[in-house]
């Protein structure tokens, strides 16, 4: 019987931490879509402003750190395997990070306006933003993350240390 709530991801398991980030990506991307529908009916009420602030906070801060975790630490470590298919998938997913960032920059002004109580029409890219981020996370989990088990323990520790340092830097 489980009587205690689940804890967060273990800081000694980079893939567990990255998967936890993906769950938040999915949650906040979906929240952006729900927010669009809410604002269409209720305007930028207090609930909408709060939701917009949460989506902004996640994608302005945590998602950026998540991309850095992959681009600076996980992807380079996995590239060293020499597995051509893995390297190709890493290159494609790395390129998608820039596309995701560009799509975010087109959705962000709408969220800022909602967070400030503005009565603006939703950015047309809200669905594309949410769907592409979720597909990207699914693909990373299917094609990249399973290979992390091949990393040596020292490399895994170094990746974890870098991820934690990124989140605790002043």
Image (cartoon, helix red, strand yellow):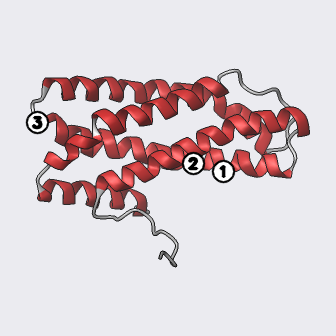
User: What is the x, y in percent for residue 38?
Assistant: 82, 38
Pointers 2 and 1 in contact (C-beta within 8 Å): yes
Q: Nearer the viewer, mark 2 or mark 3?
A: 3
Residue that numbered label 3 is attached to:
81
Vertical position of residue 70 compared to residue 15: above or below: above
Residue most toward the right?
42
User: What is the x, y in percent for residue 101?
Assistant: 50, 30
Visible residue check, residue 120? yes
Quarter of the image for the C terminus: give it.
Answer: bottom left
Q: Give the SS element for disc 3.
A: loop
Residue that numbered label 1 is attached to:
54
Residue at 79% in and 34% down: 37
Viewer-closest of 157 and 132? 132
Residue at 73% in and 32% down: 110
Residue at 35% in and 39% down: 141
Pointers 1 and 3 in contact (C-beta within 8 Å): no
For marks 2 and 3, the one nearer the N-term is 2
Left or right side of 96 for 108: right
Residue that numbered label 2 is attached to:
58
For marks 1 and 3, the one nearer the N-term is 1
User: Hey, which quadrant is residue 157 in on the image?
Assistant: bottom left
Q: Give the SS element for disc 2.
A: helix
User: What is the x, y in percent for residue 25?
Assistant: 52, 43
Mark carried by residue 23: none
Left or right side of 119 for 30: left
Q: How far apart are marks 1 and 3 (CA)?
A: 38 Å
Q: Give the SS element for disc 1.
A: helix
User: Hey, which quadrant is residue 113 in on the image?
Assistant: top right
The residue carrying pointer 2 sits among few (fewer than 14), some (14 to 19) or many (20 or more) residues within 10 Å by Cα, namely some
User: What is the x, y in percent for residue 17?
Assistant: 37, 55
């Amino acid at each position: 019987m489980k009587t205690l709530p689940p804890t967060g991801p273990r800081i000694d398991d980079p893939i567990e931490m990255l998967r936890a980030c993906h769950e938040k990506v999915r949650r906040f991307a979906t929240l952006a879509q729900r927010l669009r529908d809410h604002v269409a009916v209720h305007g930028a009420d207090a609930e909408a402003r709060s939701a917009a602030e949460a989506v902004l906070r996640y994608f302005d801060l945590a998602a950026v750190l998540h991309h850095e975790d992959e681009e600076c630490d996980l992807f380079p470590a996995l590239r060293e395997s020499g597995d051509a298919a893995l390297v190709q998938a890493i290159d494609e997913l790395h390129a998608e990070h820039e596309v995701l960032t560009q799509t975010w920059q087109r959705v962000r002004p709408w969220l800022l306006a909602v967070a400030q109580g503005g009565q603006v029409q939703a950015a047309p890219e809200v669905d594309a933003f949410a769907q592409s981020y979720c597909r990207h996370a699914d693909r990373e989990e299917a094609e990249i993350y399973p290979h992390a088990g091949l990393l040596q323990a020292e490399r895994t520790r170094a990746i974890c240390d870098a991820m934690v340092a990124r989140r605790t830097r002043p």
